[in-house]
Amino acid sequence: MKKVIMGSLMFLAGLVSTALLLSGSMANDWTINDELSSFWNLTQYGLMPAFYIFIFVAIIGLVVAIWGALEKEK
């Protein structure tokens, strides 16, 4: 049960961090061909490694939560 809770919290933290990073990058008025691009903004600020880390944390959290849910208790 502890793995499910920890995995769920990691997944939630990764998703919230990613959402904040993407929404915060759209606060600027930078455009590409008159269209806003959050990924271009993240690249300009050098935040793509942070974006990848947050996605990685969310994936690891999901895996841990599923592993904890499927694990047989002793």
Image: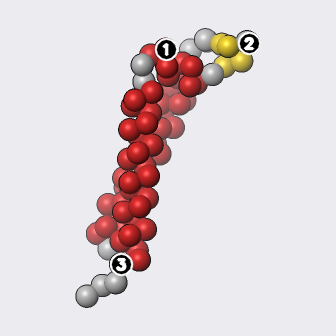
For the question of whether residue 13 can be seen, the reply is no
Q: Can residue 50 be seen in this view?
A: yes
Q: Position of residue 63 (x, y in %)?
A: 41, 61
Q: How far apart in space, not on screen, are marks 2 and 1 (Cα)?
A: 17 Å
Residue reaching furthest to the bottom: 74
Residue 26 spot, x, y in % from top left: 58, 22
Identity, as a three-letter code, of the amino acid under mark 2: Asp
> Residue 23 appears at what percent x and percent y?
54, 29
Front in this rendered view, residue 49 or 14: 49
Q: Which of marks 2 and 1 is nearer the N terminus?
A: 2
Residue placed at 38% from the left, 70% from the top? 67
Residue indicated by mark 1: 44
Residue 18 image position (x, y, % from top left): 47, 38
Mark identifier at residue 34: 2
Colour mapping used in the image: secondary structure
Q: Is residue 43 above or below residue 7?
A: above
* Comparing labels 3 and 2, the label whose residue is closer to the camera: 3
- The residues tagged by marks 1 and 3 sit, at their Cα atoms, a distance apart of 43 Å
Tell me the amino acid under the disc marked 3. Answer: Glu
Q: What element carries label 2?
A: loop
First reached walking from the N terminus: tag 1 or tag 3: 1
Q: For mark 3, give the secondary structure.
A: loop
